[in-house]
Image (spheres, rainbow, N blue to C red):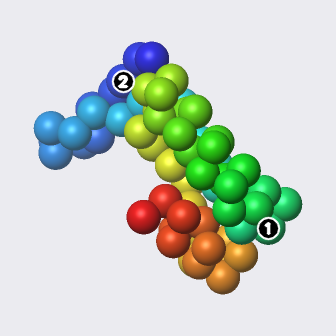
Amino acid sequence: MEYRPLGRTGVKVSQLCFGTMSFGAEADLAASRAMYKKVRDLGINFFDCADAYTKGKAETILG
């Protein structure tokens, strides 16, 4: 996985961003957790989530 700096924070984020709109909806809790584990294992550390996605379930699943 390739990473890019996040501004001047010193934090590096993966070039790829993983969207979580289906977490807690089309993807149940078990499937959501499995997807999260898989993409983390692949090195992704940049996630798109919003309270509007299934009323905050995506954020809750991510922790």
Q: Residue furthest toward the right? A: 26
Secondary structure found at label 2: strand
Given this view, does label 2 or label 1 mark the residue nearer the observer?
1
x 48%, y 28%: residue: 41
How far apart are labels 2 and 1 at the CA level? 30 Å
Secondary structure found at label 1: loop
Of 42 and 4, nearer the camera is: 42
Residue type at mark 1? Ala
Q: Which residue is mark 1?
A: 25
Q: Is residue 42 visible?
A: yes
Q: Which residue is mark 2?
A: 3
Crowd class of label 1 (few under 14; some 14 to 19; many from 20; radius 10 Å): some
Q: Residue furthest toward the top? A: 1
Q: How many marks?
A: 2
Image location (x, y in percent) of residue 25: 79, 67
Q: Is residue 23 visible?
A: no
Residue type at mark 2? Tyr
3 versus 5 height, above or below: above
Which quadrant, please, contains the C terminus?
A: bottom left
Q: Is residue 38 left or right of residue 22?
A: left
Which quadrant, please, contains the N terminus?
A: top left
Crowd class of label 2 (few under 14; some 14 to 19; many from 20; radius 10 Å): some
Image location (x, y in percent) of residue 34: 63, 43
x 54%, y 64%: residue: 61
x 68%, y 71%: residue: 53
Residues under numbered marks 2 and 1 in contact, where contact means CB atoms less than 8 Å apart? no
Q: On residue 53, which mark appears?
A: none
Q: Residue furthest toward the bottom? A: 55
18 versus 39 height, above or below: below
42 versus 60 height, above or below: above
Image location (x, y in percent) of residue 11: 22, 39
